[in-house]
Amino acid sequence: MRIDYYLGDLKNHIKWAYQRAFRGYDDTAHWGLCDCIMEIVIPVLERELKIEGVSGYPHYLLQFYPELSFKELEKKWFEIRKKIVGGFKMNLEVDEFELNDKDRAEYYKKTQEASKLFGKYFYNLWM
């Protein structure tokens, strides 16, 4: 192991920390903007899901489920956000190339569903 490799990496980490402090993001965001967005979204939605007494749902949800009651819509909204968090976490934590075919199919199903739900409800992500 070469010491100059680690020193070069240390210089990058210092540079990236400086960029985050002054720009709010660093150059690594250009390598995987989707990962950066997921890293922000996950803790926000996880906190939202844990808060007791938070009620409501976006009015937009009524378009898709007009037959559901207020409580059922709240539950549906909770489940939607939970699926987004689960799929995003899986995307960040699992190396898809190490999965067998069956597990990879499940991985794609969950991560794609999370992405679609995030896009569909993007303007409705509030507490």
Image (cartoon, helix red, strand yellow):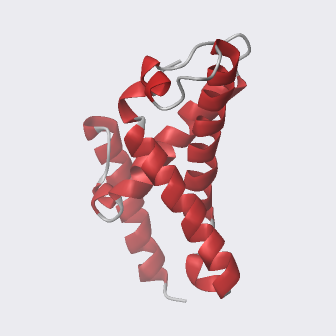
**Residue 77 found in image quarter:** top right
Q: How many marks?
A: 0
Quadrant location of the N terminus in the rendered image? bottom right
- Residue 110 visible in the picture: yes
Residue at the location (34% across, 37% down)? Answer: 21
- Closer to the camera in the image, 33 or 53: 53
Going by the image, does 52 lie left or right of 33? right
Residue at the location (42% across, 35% down)? Answer: 121
Q: In this picture, is 60 found above or below 116?
A: above
- Closer to the camera in the image, 35 or 60: 60
Q: In this picture, is 68 found above or below 39?
A: above
**Where in the figure is residue 39, as x and y percent of width and height?**
50, 47
**Where in the figure is residue 13, as x and y percent of width and height?**
41, 58
Residue at the location (47% across, 41% down)? Answer: 40
**Where in the figure is residue 12, as x and y percent of width and height?**
36, 63
- Closer to the camera in the image, 116 or 21: 116
- Residue 47 visible in the picture: no
Going by the image, does 108 lie left or right of 76? left
Going by the image, does 59 lie left or right of 42? left
Residue at the location (61% across, 76% down)? Answer: 105
Q: Residue furthest front?
A: 67
Q: In this picture, is 93 found above or below 19?
A: below
